[in-house]
Amino acid sequence: MNALSLSLLIFVLILGGIFLGALLRKMLPENHLSKEAQDVVRLGVGLVATMAALVLGLLIASAKTSFDTQTSQVKQITANIILLDTLLAQYGPEALPIRVQIRSGIGAFADKIWSEKQHRTNAPFEANAATEQIYIAIQALPPKSDLQKPLQARAAQVSNDLVQTRMLLFVGSGDLIPTPFLAILVFWLVIIFGSFSLFSNLNATVIAFLSLFALSASCAIFLILELSQPFSGLMMIASGPLRNALAPLGP
């Protein structure tokens, strides 16, 4: 289930909590709705609301950190590819076939990253054959001058850094919010909103504002879910900069 569908479901559940509270108000005897009962319920709900607010804040911060980290890793991969191509260009015409190979494989390389992040499974990491061939080709370059030797070493190091960042991006996959944790958070929200209608009559104004509050809570969860899936959804990291990192080689 995608982030939008799950957030809409949570919104409906919270609305159900509101109407459940109104139903309980009609079913409970008057002595269960006394001032003392209201004070006890409000104290308990205040504790639950504080926990829910803290958890939501921490989750948003954690999701934003995860989103920024993976965005930074994609930018680092893009920067390493540009740097690698620059070093090979400085190396000389001997490195031209490698530069051509990098350009021909960069689209498939980007497709592989976005595909495995969108369809997260427990499958092991699969090395990219084209990437390994490029690394081997860089190592096999025959330095013919004192200038080419450090350029070859630097290019090999950059390609190694690129692969390392790629693996860090792979192992960073995974659901940010475990399902039981999300279910408990939604349960807390249902209790909170159910208490709002337990001791007050529902009229058009109250229903409208409670619905807005429920929508706000659902939007917060939607934001967390979207940030935890940076390679899909409305806040997806764009693959264009990586695909277009290198200009076409001239004739």
Image: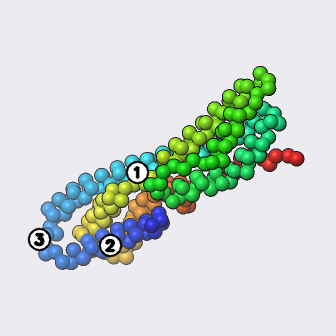
Q: Say whether disc 2 or disc 3 marks the residue closer to the N-terminus.
A: 2
Residues at circles 1 and 3 in contact by the CB criterion of under 8 Å: no
Q: Which mark is residue 25?
A: none
The tally of labels here is: 3
As measured in the structure, the alpha-carbon distance from the residue carrying label 2 to the one carrying label 3 is 25 Å
Residue 216 is situated, as x and y percent measured from the top left of the image, at 43, 62
Query: Does residue 236 appear left or right of residue 250 in this picture?
Result: left
Q: Say whether disc 2 or disc 1 marks the residue closer to the N-terminus.
A: 2
Residue 179 is situated, as x and y percent measured from the top left of the image, at 36, 59
Q: Quadrant of residue 192?
A: bottom left
Q: Please, is residue 175 above or below residue 77 in the view? A: below
Point 25% across, 58% down: residue: 45
Residues at circles 2 and 3 in contact by the CB criterion of under 8 Å: no
Label 2 vs label 1, nearer the camera: 1
Nearest the eye: 144 or 160: 144
Q: Which mark is residue 16?
A: 2
- Residue beneath disc 1: 59
Q: Quadrant of residue 157?
A: top right
User: What amino acid does circle 2 point to?
Assistant: Gly
Point 51% across, 49% down: residue: 125
Label 2 vs label 3, nearer the camera: 2
Q: Secondary structure at mark 3?
A: helix
- Residue beneath disc 3: 31
Point 21% across, 74% down: residue: 24
